[in-house]
Amino acid sequence: MRTALFITCFNDTMHPATGRAVVTLLERLGCTVDFPAGQTCCGQMHFNTGYQRDCIPLVRRFGEVFAGYDAVVAPSGSCAAMIRHHHARVAEVAGDRGLLEAVRTAPPVYELSEFLVDVLEVTDVGAYFPHRVTYHPTCHSLRMLGVADRPLALLRAVRGIDLVELPDATQCCGFGGTFALKNSDTSVAMGADKVRGVLDSGAEVLCAGDNSCLTHIGGLLSRLRTGVRTMHLAEILAATERTTATEPTTATERTTATGAPSHAVATGGGPR
Amino acid sequence: MSSAFLGMPPFPQAARRALADTQQRRNLAGATRTIRHKRAEVVGELPDWEELREAGRALKERTLRHLDHYLVQLEERVTAAGGQVHWARDAAEANRIVTRLVQETGEREVVKVKSMTTQETGLNRALETAGITAYETDLAELIVQLGDDLPSHILVPAIHRNRAEIRELFRRTMPDAEGVGDDPAELAEAARRYLRQKFLRAKVGISGANFLVAETGTAVVVESEGNGRMCLTLPETLISVVGIEKVVPTWQDLEVYLQLLPRSSTGERMNPYTSTWTGTQDGDGPRGFHLVLLDGGRTDTLADRIGRQTLNCIRCSACLNVCPVYERTGGHAYGSVYPGPIGAVLNPQLRGTGTETDRSLPFASTLCGACYEVCPVKIDIPEVLVHLRARVVEETGGRRHTPTPEAVAMRAARWVFSSPARLSAAQRLAALGSRVVARRGRIARLPGPLAGWTDARDAPAPAGEPFRQWWERTHR
Ligand code: SF4
């Protein structure tokens, strides 16, 4: 099976540690992934903000870059949902039959937890993560993709983990893409309640399958110096006995601003 | 009598003000949570809920496809049963018709059953201008009216008020209510005494309708308090103002909606009062019946392939109760009698996108999808929101206009994302730029339009080594 990784533009630029973790994890599970270098963005921000025409070249590029693969894995629920549910609409807006056909025949796109549970058929990925963790089911994973409890099943199988319930877990965190800027007051009010849930859970790590929501909640957790950090599901699942000693400390310090990554998860494990 | 939503600021500003109202925040959080749970419980009892929803959607969509046919059938049957049908192109015309009909009776007072459609047309103000006093008889609607307030919820228009505020209002505005306490039963009793006189005196009743059954020309009102039953049976003349999308072909179709509506709306298996009336009947109920059918932007909405599903709405308000935005901002921020998710898609279609408020509504959502999940007629509200966002962007930033700063930014982003080389260059630039503002990988203050992010949230710094560089270095 030829599997391609769609890292997403946001992870590529802001959270490369997540991408490295996906590679580490999948390689550890014996799955060879490819990263087609021509990939950029799925068009979600443009589409959801009303700039549907600006999506057209992005959807076209996506189709060309991933044509010929058997499966595409993306460590982002909302990007996977954008591709699965809205690329056809963009092709429709473009009035381009060829593009619509390309979208229809494109390889299936899986969010990470779907790929692990449904395609690789694993829930115990051999991870070790001795921390208290709570999980936020991001809205697009939950409602648009319907990943249900796949991420929780994966987390439950992690050795050493103390998985605690998040109160009002299914309530939106308030990120909403450009909503976070256009309606920043409401966005922050919603985020504040999410933060309250996270703090009430007693967790030291908030985990989710989408770094965009985590950037929003993590930004609040960090600003308030709560001592709770955010981690993408991939990073917890990639962690093993060999890697957990060198974790970074806060949500927004996961990536160093300069130089090469110091993250052990990033380079450890897996065949080259 | 009732104030208007005219001149409201766009959603973000109105929301900022509403978010600071601590009393309202607490009321709404409590009330929406209670009703959410009630709904989830009674919906969970039905093993065929999803099939019911699907039936509710399919029936509406089929009916709307043949709306012309069913409306004509309805008119025939209503007329044959002794009623009179009036067609109103817009709110102003509907109000003119109703005012004239009331004037023809010679009455100066009317009692009203809670009706979203007459809220939409602003009927009470129009009547007031003509010297006619309208009395709202639904408890929550009465509270809004007495307080010269605005409704903030479809089902519970006074959801933003608590009982202390209501007691204060009753003491101030109702005769013989000086001594009333803040116990809900006592407050309801005071309202009951106040309303009883209005019911007994009124010669004209005004209502909306939840459904219109085309095959018999029957109007249906679903309610909880019994005030509707009073208004529909006691007066001599009954005027019902109803949107054209409320028609269903047959009584059998009602079966679906009478299961969907109460469970979605009040979280009850069945509502206490369902009143139906067909034209007029000698010696029973009103002797004159007028049905005013309102278009008010509905035909235009129907013409839009994606937007038309909005007309499926049965005004249950389940989407409001689950909406995380509504729960925090309340209804007034939406600048319309239709707040919440349904308001965010309905207003810009019925009223158009001519005002800043209406243009801001499609953006007043995180697209979390909670509304779609509960909607009993399966309106994909996020899909319609995004569709309307595109319409707003076309109208304000489209090719015919000077581009807005946002449109320029979006075009620049498209340009960057159209080439991996450009993306790499942009990543290098961002990492460089962030060195200036980042402390230990954390940015506390961003410049320009991004400042809204860092007002309350830290931002991460772009990575020194983007993923694609790492891959290049380790996997090639
Ligand atoms: S949109 Fe759906 S959930 Fe909202 S009020 Fe209408 S019918 Fe109810």
Image: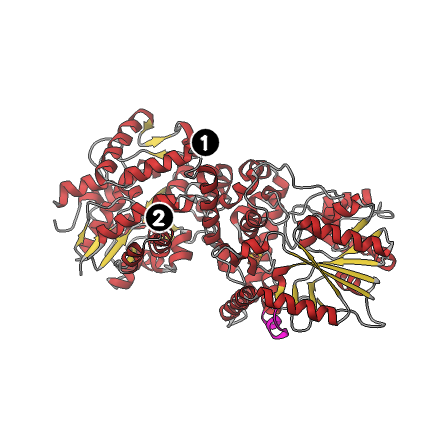
Label 1 residue SS: loop
| Residue B252 on the magenta segment | yes
The three-letter code of the residue at mark 2 reads Asp
Spot occupied by residue B414 in the image (x, y as percentages of width and height)? 32, 40
Badge 1 vs badge 2, beta-carbon distance below 8 Å: no
The three-letter code of the residue at mark 1 reads Asp
Residue at the image point whose x is 65% and y is 73% from the top:
B215
In the rendered view, tell whether residue B256 sits above or below residue A228. Answer: below
Q: Is residue B194 visible?
A: no
Nearer the observer, A42 or A187: A42
Give the residue pinned by disc 2.
Answer: A210
Q: Which residues are magenta?
A: B248-256
Nearer the observer, B24 or B134: B134
Nearer the observer, B278 or A81: B278
Q: Residues within 10 Å of mark 1 (few under 14, many from 20)?
A: some
Label 2 residue SS: loop
Spot occupied by residue A260 in the image (x, y as percentages of width and height)? 19, 35
Residue B68 position by quadrant: bottom right
Give the residue pinned by disc 1.
Answer: B455
Q: Is residue A207 visible?
A: yes
In the rendered view, tell whether residue B48 sits above or below residue A11. Answer: below
Secondary structure that dominates the magenta span: helix
| Residue A159 on the magenta segment | no
